[in-house]
Amino acid sequence: MRIARIAALTAALALGAAGVASASELDVAVSPSTAPLGALHTVTGQMRDDAGAALARRRISLQVRPFPFSGRWRTVDHATTDAKGRYAIDDIELDRNADVRAIAFDGTTSGIARAFTYPAHRLGYHVVGKRRIRLTQTYRTPRDVRLSKRTLFYVGSGSATSAPVRARGKTTRVRAGRYRSVVTVMLPRAFRGRFQYASCFVYSPGSGMGDPAQGCPKRYSFENP
């Protein structure tokens, strides 16, 4: 999974009576950058001076601005840089997509790293007849989120390395924060009762959950899920 690092330069306070100015650089990264609801993120970065030297023992504030990325920044935690100017903040839980940045107590501000949170989900199947299976995908979201896009289901033989889309199921709201998509698939005789299955769902506009730029493949690869 890729982790983008973004940095920004901010003028520091004047040093001493002579007014000699310096600059510092602070970067930020969030890992994983894409994760399901309920997963924890780790935010890391480093602070350096304008010559590239590490700045140790600098106090850092971690701020978050959730989707739709237009509200106020909220401070969620703090850290102190180590001897190499590095900091790390663990166990950050996000309930939807969010911008993340770091601010040092001298005013130095990092760029923005975006973290994507998609619905927590579970996929399963039941045999409902001869060569017929029912695939069910359930979703968990914050109560005010609305999912609207269909769920894609892939089914291949037990020995297949990839599979095409076999069905597209409507994603239905069960209750606040709970959704479900159900389809029935007929297995080809050539499968001889052995099969593999997977699913994919794309971003629902306005939901603030998932990467809008990430779509679903025409074929699902079981070798590289």
Image (spheres, rainbow, N blue to C red):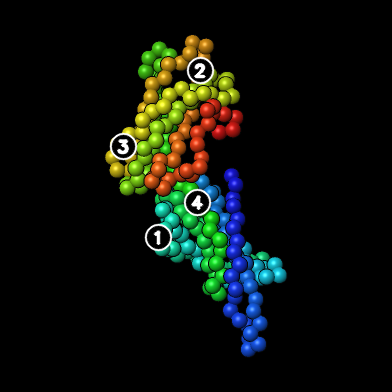
**Inter-mark Cα distance, 2 to 1:** 51 Å
Residue 163 lies left or right of residue 149; in this view the side is: right
Going from N to C along the chain, the mark reached first, 3 or 4, is 4
* Label 3: how many Cα within 10 Å (few below 14, some 14–19, many 20+): some
Number of the front mark, 3 or 2: 3
**Inter-mark Cα distance, 3 to 2:** 31 Å
Residue 135 lies left or right of residue 50; in this view the side is: left
Q: Amino acid at mark 3?
A: Arg
Count of numbered circles in the view: 4
**Inter-mark Cα distance, 1 to 4:** 16 Å
Residue to which mark 3 is pinned:
173
Q: Amino acid at mark 2?
A: Arg
Secondary element under disc 4, as helix, strand or loop, is: strand
Going from N to C along the chain, the mark reached first, 1 or 4, is 1
Numbered mark located on residue 71 in the image: 1
**Inter-mark Cα distance, 3 to 1:** 28 Å
Q: Quadrant of the C terminus?
A: top right
Q: Are marks 2 and 4 in contact (CB under 8 Å)?
A: no
Residue 155 in view here: yes
Q: Are marks 3 and 1 in contact (CB under 8 Å)?
A: no
Q: Amino acid at mark 1?
A: Gly
Residue at horizontal 38 percent and vertical 28 percent from the top: 169
Q: Amino acid at mark 4?
A: Ala
Query: On screen, 29 above or below 107?
Result: above
Numbered mark located on residue 194 in the image: 2
Residue to which mark 4 is pinned:
115
**Inter-mark Cα distance, 3 to 4:** 25 Å
Expressed as whole percent of the image width and height from the top left, the position of residue 18 reads 66, 87
